[in-house]
């Protein structure tokens, strides 16, 4: 089993067919089919169920997915480690962060870093739950993660970056005359938020619990980008960080501070050992731009 075979296997699994995978890899389909066949013979089990116009993973194929991704990640880390000895600017950093913190502060850090090290590539993924961020950084599947709340300890280290104040975002004509608002006063308007496990939902659920209100939504959406348009359409109200709320205000939404000020502290996390040279520079830049450099 070699790196090329694993790359081919993952391409077929992700594309769902040999034809699409061959096109994505820019190789001939017979060559791809031959390589997968060799891999299946080496492992002693079929990895794909051949269907009419595509393929489906067998149980053996599903079992190979995670080890294959981690093996390719190890190859990548080895390459980056060697090249970074002679070229600090070369490398690839993987970061997992929910959309809220990916917009602010992550965008600014990456922009500044790329200006200094344009050869470094970034891959940013969105977790389903906060625990996904911790798990991927611990396992080495991601170099860095961004989380709010109390930062983890143990094998992970962290750097405080920024605090985001939460504010209420309401339809244009809602609650006229008020200059502040409580979460309880938002409940009758109907609450709009993202799915359970997301950062924004956890922040809202915490506020509802403190206020003694039930965690019930008028609109639950998987798309953070839909929250502001839903508010503007009159579907309900939302809690958002000030940065996103400023955009909502410019589009006509009514933005009010919460009567009980609430902030979300955002931390950058990484494994205590094993950062590549680009990773070390990224950590230092983040601390310089947002936190107290340590």
Image: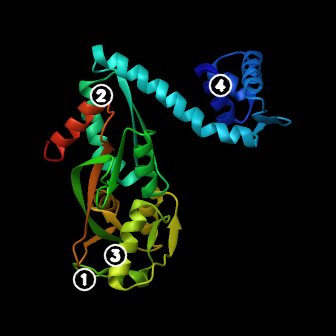
Residue corresponding to mark 2: 278
Is 255 located above or below residue 184 in the figure?
above
| Quadrant of the snapshot with the N terminus | top right
Residue corresponding to mark 3: 207
Residue corresponding to mark 1: 177
Mark 2 crowdedness (10 Å alpha carbons): few <14, some 14-19, many ≥20: many
Mark 4 crowdedness (10 Å alpha carbons): few <14, some 14-19, many ≥20: many
Q: Which quadrant holds residue 262?
A: bottom left
Residue corresponding to mark 4: 8
Give the secondary structure at mark 2: helix
Pointer 1 or 4: first along the chain: 4
Q: Is residue 190 left or right of residue 256?
A: right
Percent coordinates x, y for residue 110 in the rendering: 30, 36
Q: Is residue 53 left or right of residue 88?
A: right
Spatial CA distance of label 2 from label 1 is 52 Å
Identify the residue at image location x=15%, y=40%.
288
Identify the residue at image location x=77%, y=29%.
44
Badge nearest the viewer, 1 or 4: 4
Identify the residue at image location x=29%, y=21%.
89
Pointer 2 or 3: first along the chain: 3
Is 102 located above or below residue 278 in the figure?
below
Spatial CA distance of label 1 from label 4 is 62 Å
Spatial CA distance of label 2 from label 3 is 38 Å
Give the secondary structure at mark 4: helix
Percent coordinates x, y for residue 86 in the rendering: 28, 13
Badge nearest the viewer, 2 or 3: 2
């Amino acid at each position: 089993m070699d790196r090329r075979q694993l790359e081919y296997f993952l391409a077929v699994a992700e594309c769902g067919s040999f034809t699409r995978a061959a096109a994505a890899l820019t190789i001939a389909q017979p060559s791809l089919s031959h390589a997968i066949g060799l891999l299946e013979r080496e492992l002693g089990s079929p990895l794909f169920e051949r269907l009419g116009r595509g393929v489906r993973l067998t149980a053996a194929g599903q079992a190979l997915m995670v080890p294959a991704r981690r093996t390719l990640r190890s190859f990548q880390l080895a390459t980056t480690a060697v090249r970074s000895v002679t070229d600090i600017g070369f490398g690839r950093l993987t970061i997992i962060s929910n959309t809220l913190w990916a917009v602010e502060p992550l965008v600014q850090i990456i922009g500044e870093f790329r200006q200094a090290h344009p050869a470094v590539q970034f891959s940013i993924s969105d977790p389903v739950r906060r625990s996904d961020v911790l798990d991927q950084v611990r396992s080495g599947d991601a170099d860095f993660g961004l989380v709010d709340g109390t930062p983890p300890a143990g094998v992970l280290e962290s750097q405080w970056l920024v605090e985001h104040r939460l504010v209420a975002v309401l339809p244009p004509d809602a609650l006229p005359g008020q200059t502040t608002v409580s979460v309880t006063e938002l409940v009758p308007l109907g609450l709009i938020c993202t799915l359970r496990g997301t950062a924004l939902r956890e922040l809202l659920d915490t506020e509802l619990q403190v206020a003694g209100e039930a965690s019930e939504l008028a609109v639950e959406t998987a798309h953070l980008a839909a929250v502001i348009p839903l508010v503007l359409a009159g579907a309900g109200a939302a809690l958002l960080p000030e940065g996103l709320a400023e955009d909502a205000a410019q589009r006509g939404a009514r933005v009010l501070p919460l009567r009980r000020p609430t902030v979300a502290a955002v931390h950058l996390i990484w494994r205590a050992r094993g950062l590549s040279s680009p990773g070390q520079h990224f950590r230092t830049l983040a601390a310089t731009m947002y936190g107290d450099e340590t």
